[in-house]
Amino acid sequence: MKRWQKITLTILFVLIGFGLAGYQNRTSLMLAYIKNFTHPDVADNRTVQWAQGPKEIAIPPAERPPNIIFILADDLGINDISTFGGGVAGGRVPTPHIDKLAADGAIFSQAYAGNATCAPSRGMLMTGRYPTRTGFEFTPTPPGMGRMVSAISNELDSGLPPAEYMPSADNAVAYEDMGLPGSEITIAELLKEQGYHTAHIGKWHLGRNAETNPLAQGFDESLLMASGLFLEEDDPDGVKAQLDFDPIDKFLWAGMQYAASFHNEEFDDATRFKPGGYLTDWWTDESLKVIGANRNRPFFLYLAHWGVHTPLQATRADYEAVGDIKPHRLRVYAAMVRALDRSVGRIMKKLEEEGLADNTIIVFSSDNGGAGYIGLPEVNAPYRGWKITLFEGGIRAPMFVKWPAKIKPGTLVETPVAHIDVMPTLVAAGGAPLPEGVEIDGKNMLPAATGTGSISRLDDAIFWQSGYYQVVRAGDWKLQVNGRQKKSWLFNLADDPTEQKNIAEVNPAKLAELKQLLANHHKDRKPPLYAYSLESPIAIDKTRADKIVAGDEYIFWPN
């Protein structure tokens, strides 16, 4: 039977099934359809042809502008890193390479992601600007994801209120067009104008049309995550953990493939091929090639890892190496963290081998906190909340900056910083001016890291938002406001760093002061580029694997 005939019969089968089956069975049928009949073709692996820089040294590395490498993890919990005294599985799986990067440079002990979901954080990293200026406020979601996630979520007996799907918003803007506007100016664009060779490897999630793809936003080359499996689902050298309690995981396993695409002169995302190994390791292999190819000229490498985001997949070697950890999903997760840490170590070793380590800046961070939907309660300890909440667990992120030529080992910076500060920092390091006529919200972190100055921002305030859920931290005070729930949470982080006691009712003056800061921040704001299609209830103190009972707190998150 030909493929088109199979597809026709399957659609017919699904439609009949929708009429006859119950709600849960209808969802299962749709997942089966997505998994088997909607995937584009993926070619065999091929060699990536990276541009080659000068073969001879024109200017010694110490006399050139610094090379810049920004390594971004995905959904890495603050407690997954042993730098802060934690580590996966109670410290059984440390992160020695990430720890060394941190110890060799500056640790920002109060660092924050730009948002509690990935894409808005990445937009702020690239531009140094809040969503109130760019309109890039909600994470792009593929067609049908909102409908399917809400349907699966509402089938599960979680104890949470139902998720709400907004069909009018779904597909109102094409997925490829849900991106950071081309009018925004990125780190890559500014460094490229300064003579840097710019390369992107990994996740993008900032748009894939003619004005939003990586090449359009300043990168000379882009090895793109075209889908989201770390290995083929049935790879004998891999180990997976599927999460029956998580609607997002069900959608990912149904919708994702093992695929990449490469772009240098034009962007054509239709040309997909299989990666050359476990995704975290293969992207690192390719990163080492980029470093070698550009050792004789300044380069900016943005390595945006997919690890440790779901779907949970690890190599069998890493799974065996971490030992007999229970439950199974924690062991797979630990193995994924091990691979991520190995990546950082390999990059630092390559820089040493090429004689580039002293005058290369390496920044390491994560796009948001660990996710509660993986069912692992310790990933963000001791902080409350998860990815998809603006409690500290959702937005606390590592921020380590190593630059041996300028930053002394063991430097500790306790001033709060966030992802909006990355762009002005790296642009300053590369000797490029900030764009004229553009309001940049972030601040240069280098004076604090090098001991030559400090970080100062208006009202000492940092802001976060997703629709009606808005947050400000000013000094040690932090206010969260959820418009749908008409609820406020106020904390003094100096006294209560893990947000245990809501003191909004007993501090009306401070509550009013911080609400005014939020109002000022949102005055004349640019509206979101597209509407949210899903409102999800997210438990604050329990994972998705746990049953919610009366008295448990939750927030609603629009995206």
Image (cartoon, helix red, strand yellow):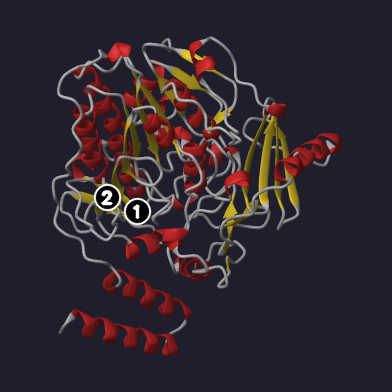
The mark nearer the N terminus, 2 or 1, is 2
Q: Position of residue 224 (x, y in %)?
A: 30, 48
Report whether residue 245 is seen. Answer: no
Whether residue 274 sits left or right of residue 448 in the image: it is: left
Q: Residue at x 64, y 53 (%)?
A: 555
Name the residue type under label 2: Phe
Q: Residue at x 45, y 69 (%)?
A: 144
Q: Residue at x 68, y 38 (%)?
A: 472
Read off the residue under disc 2. Answer: 230
Number of on-image labels = 2
Q: Dot 2, how many residues are within 10 Å of its Cα: few (below 14), some (14-19), or many (20+)?
A: many
Q: Position of residue 194 (x, y in %)?
A: 39, 27
Report whether residue 425 is seen. Answer: yes
Q: Secondary structure at mark 1?
A: loop
Q: Dot 1, how many residues are within 10 Å of its Cα: few (below 14), some (14-19), or many (20+)?
A: many
Name the residue type under label 1: Pro
- Quarter of the C terminus within the rendering: bottom right
Q: Position of residue 7 (x, y in %)?
A: 26, 81
Labelled disc at residue 525: none
What is the distance, in whole Å, between disc 2 and disc 1 at their CAs?
8 Å
Q: Residue at x 16, y 49 (%)?
A: 237
Read off the residue under disc 1. Answer: 311
The foreground one among 21 and 362 is 362
The foreground one among 33 and 189 is 189
Up-down: is 354 above or below 95? above
- Tag 2 and tag 1, C-beta contact below 8 Å: yes
The foreground one among 532 and 217 is 217
Q: Secondary structure at mark 2?
A: loop
Up-down: is 109 above or below 5? above
